[in-house]
């Protein structure tokens, strides 16, 4: 049972009547009428227990887009249901409308549509549906909650998808689909052609030349069916915001572009999210399904406010990458964390793998470093220069130990990481 706002207004009006007459009889009459009306509402309101509640609709949506979930309320009783229906979702789900006034005749049903526009990634689970069955006078209502479970997974938005056509065009050129091969490019045999002046003599196929009575050279293409392991660091440094976006979300966007590109190139892509333990893993997915699998695996991941265990991360990466692979580690170039954590394990990772480290750089450091107006800005500039020099030092240190480094702002990191992959593929270093 619950009282409505109309009951409060009726009680206020009754109080004014009592004050006007200043009589015990008026008090009894007003209170008796009010109580009788409330009792009538409770008796005549349609019962809630027989109601049947069900859901249908979308179960996945990209962050920033909208999804529709239908809520159907069936009234098997003999009374018309006049009710307020409140469909409860987490605040970050952006559910609209919050509640609806409905009228469902006896033996009838009504479908309500809730539109979700989520503001955060992850699983958004619907709570119970609250139904308030109103009486004919609207002073009191029967109220109960009905279970109607439903979960919508909010996927990373993949904003870097706009770069994919350009990268695929470069990939087709590297792969020879446009017959624009560069001499010596790649290391996988493609075809034979006649020798022309300027060709590398080391590419001459003497057996083919003897058979055809002409000098023939081999052409090469970038390797296919190579293995790529993307390792996403979900430790405390991934929680930092750069340009208003968490580092983790930018790294996810770069992961999606690289996964889409590598799967189109015919390479096998595995994925690992790690801090002190494995948070998500995608291994052995087909080329046609790997992008969807990685997207769904990343959706519920949130940064963990713990220091990443570099030794355990390296062990998990080597366990997953059993064959020679390109290991792409998306982390932060924090000098202390890299020097004490990643650097001692890098030789083990790079012993039989190509290692590529990608990090999100903060463009605000360049702006701070340029400030000279006043004492405060000078101190800020000094701090910014120290931070930038620390990242440059760490980057150079990683490169000396055999890793390639991509350190770029959020808007450029996905594209530059894809470019680094294409360069490695063109050079035959995968």
Image (cartoon, helix red, strand yellow):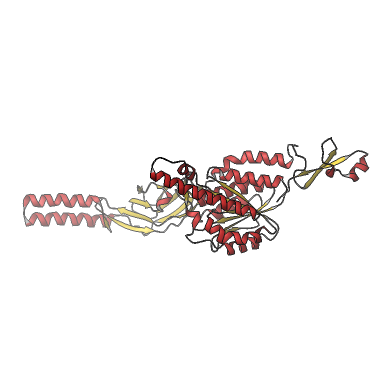
**Residue 243 placed where, x, y %?**
47, 45
User: Which is nearer the eye, 67 or 411?
Assistant: 411
Place residue 285 in its image quadrant: bottom right
User: Which is nearer the eye, 102 or 259?
Assistant: 259
The residue most toward the top is 197
Q: Tell me if I can see residue 77 in this picture.
A: no
Q: Is residue 275 above or below residue 118?
A: below
User: Which is nearer the eye, 13 or 323?
Assistant: 323
User: Which is nearer the eye, 149 or 322?
Assistant: 322
- Image quarter hosting the N terminus: bottom left
**Residue 249 placed where, x, y %?**
51, 50
At 64% from the left edge and 46% from the top edge, which residue is drawn?
A: 420
The residue most toward the left is 22
Place residue 179 in its image quadrant: top right
**Residue 197 placed where, x, y %?**
84, 35
**Residue 429 placed where, x, y %?**
71, 50
Q: State how many labels appear.
A: 0
Place residue 413 in its image quadrant: top right
Q: Is residue 336 left or right of residue 173?
A: left
Q: Is residue 244 above or below residue 339?
A: above
At 49% from the left edge and 59% from the top edge, which residue is drawn?
A: 304
Q: Is residue 340 left or right of residue 31?
A: right
Q: Is residue 180 left or right of residue 327?
A: right
At 82% from the left edge and 41% from the top edge, which residue is drawn?
A: 200
Q: Tell me if I can see residue 132 in this picture.
A: yes
């Amino acid at each position: 049972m619950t009282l409505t706002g109309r009951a409060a207004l009726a009680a206020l009006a009754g109080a004014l009547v009592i004050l006007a007459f200043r009589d015990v009889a008026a008090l009894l009459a007003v209170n008796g009428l009010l109580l009788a009306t409330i009792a009538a509402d409770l008796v005549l309101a349609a019962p809630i227990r027989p109601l049947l509640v069900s859901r249908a609709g979308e179960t996945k949506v990209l962050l920033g887009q909208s999804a529709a979930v239908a809520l159907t309320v069936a009234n098997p009783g003999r009374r018309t249901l006049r009710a307020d229906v409140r469909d409860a979702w987490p605040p970050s789900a952006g559910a609209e409308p919050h509640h609806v006034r409905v009228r469902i005749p006896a033996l009838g049903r009504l479908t309500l549509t809730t539109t979700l526009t989520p503001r955060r990634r992850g699983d958004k689970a619907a709570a119970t549906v609250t139904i308030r069955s109103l009486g004919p006078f609207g002073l009191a209502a029967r109220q109960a909650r009905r279970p109607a479970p439903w979960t919508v997974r909010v996927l990373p938005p993949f904003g870097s998808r706009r770069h994919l056509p350009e990268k695929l065009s470069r990939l087709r050129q590297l792969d020879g689909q446009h017959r624009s091969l560069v001499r010596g490019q790649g290391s996988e045999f493609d075809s034979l052609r006649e020798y022309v002046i300027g060709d590398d003599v080391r590419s001459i196929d003497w057996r083919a030349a003897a058979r055809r009575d002409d000098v023939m050279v081999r052409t090469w293409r970038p390797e296919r069916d190579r293995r790529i392991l993307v390792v996403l660091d979900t430790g405390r440094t991934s929680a930092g915001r750069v340009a208003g976006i968490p580092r983790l979300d930018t790294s996810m966007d770069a992961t999606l572009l690289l996964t889409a590109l590598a799967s189109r190139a015919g390479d096998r892509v595995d994925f690992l999210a790690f801090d002190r333990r494995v948070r998500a893993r995608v291994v052995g997915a087909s080329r046609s399904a790997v992008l969807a699998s990685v997207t769904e695996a990343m959706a519920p991941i949130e940064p963990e406010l713990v220091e990443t265990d570099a030794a355990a991360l390296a062990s998990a990466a080597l366990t997953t990458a059993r064959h020679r692979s390109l290991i792409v580690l998306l982390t932060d170039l924090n000098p202390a964390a890299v020097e004490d954590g990643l650097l001692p394990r890098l030789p083990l990772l790079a012993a039989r793998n190509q290692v590529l480290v990608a990090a999100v750089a903060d463009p605000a450091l360049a702006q701070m470093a340029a400030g000279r107006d006043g004492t405060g800005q000078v101190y800020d500039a000094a701090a910014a220069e120290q931070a930038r020099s620390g990242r440059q030092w760490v980057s150079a240190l990683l490169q000396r130990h055999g890793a390639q480094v991509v350190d770029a702002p959020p808007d450029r990191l996905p594209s530059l990481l894809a470019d680094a992959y294409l360069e490695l593929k063109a050079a035959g270093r995968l």
